[in-house]
Amino acid sequence: MSNIRVAKTIEAKKIGAFFDDVVLYMDNRGENYPKWTYKVYPSTSFAVSMAEKGQLYLAIEDGELLGEFVLNEDPQGDYEKGKWSKDLKRGEFLVCHSLAVAPSSFGKGIGEAMGALVIRKAKEEGYKAVRLDVAPGNFPAIRLYEKCGFSYIGDEDLDRGYDFIPKFSLMEYNF
């Protein structure tokens, strides 16, 4: 199994190339379920920003980047609109963003390992839940999160201003 650790800022260029490869793979297959945009989101500048804050995590095995995710307290939208099962304030839950697995590692348990780490870290740090959102129709992500124990709670407009994603599917894992 891969080692999952916090990314270093000096790795941002490598992480940006990883994002580009993942987006191109999805685009070429007509399966860009998260609706990511090549070289726009996620990108090298996004990797730099998240790595500088210590919020970007990498799954690495034998020096190869197999997956990544962001973990912080910022929902990047109006999560108060969600019909969450617990009434929690910001700071009482962690948010997982932009989880991706290298196409060469699909089906090898990398996503599940990253999801398990997200849950374990949130619990160890005393959070009451992990929350996240995905583009509706992002069935691979929804299946992964459900496999990790997350519950789907509905679709909401998070006031992010994305015309191409007017609503997001919300998921939660409570402790």
Image (cartoon, rainbow, N blue to C red):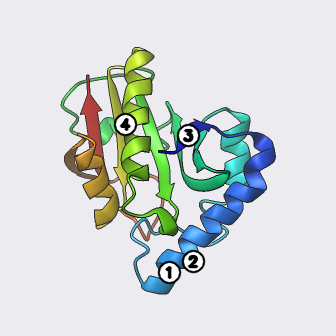
Q: CA distance from mark 2 to mark 3?
A: 25 Å
- Of the residues tagged 1 and 3, which is closer to the observer? 3
**155 or 99, nearer to the observer:** 99
* Vertical position of residue 132 compared to residue 143: above or below: above
User: Residue flagged by tag 3: what amino acid is it?
Assistant: Asn
**41 or 23, nearer to the observer:** 23
For marks 2 and 4, the one nearer the N-term is: 2
User: Residue flagged by tag 2: what amino acid is it?
Assistant: Leu
Q: CA distance from mark 1 to mark 2?
A: 5 Å
Labels in figure, total: 4
Res. 44 image quadrant: bottom right
Q: Secondary structure at mark 1?
A: helix
Q: Tell me: 175 left or right of 70.
A: left
* Vertical position of residue 26 compared to residue 15: above or below: below
Residue at 77% from the left image edge and 57% from the top image edge: 13
**147 or 125, nearer to the observer:** 147
Residue with the mark numbered 4? 116
Q: CA distance from mark 3 to mark 4?
A: 13 Å
Q: Are marks 1 and 2 in contact (CB under 8 Å)?
A: yes
Whether residue 158 is visible, yes or no, is no
Residue with the mark numbered 3? 3
- Of the residues tagged 2 and 4, which is closer to the observer? 4
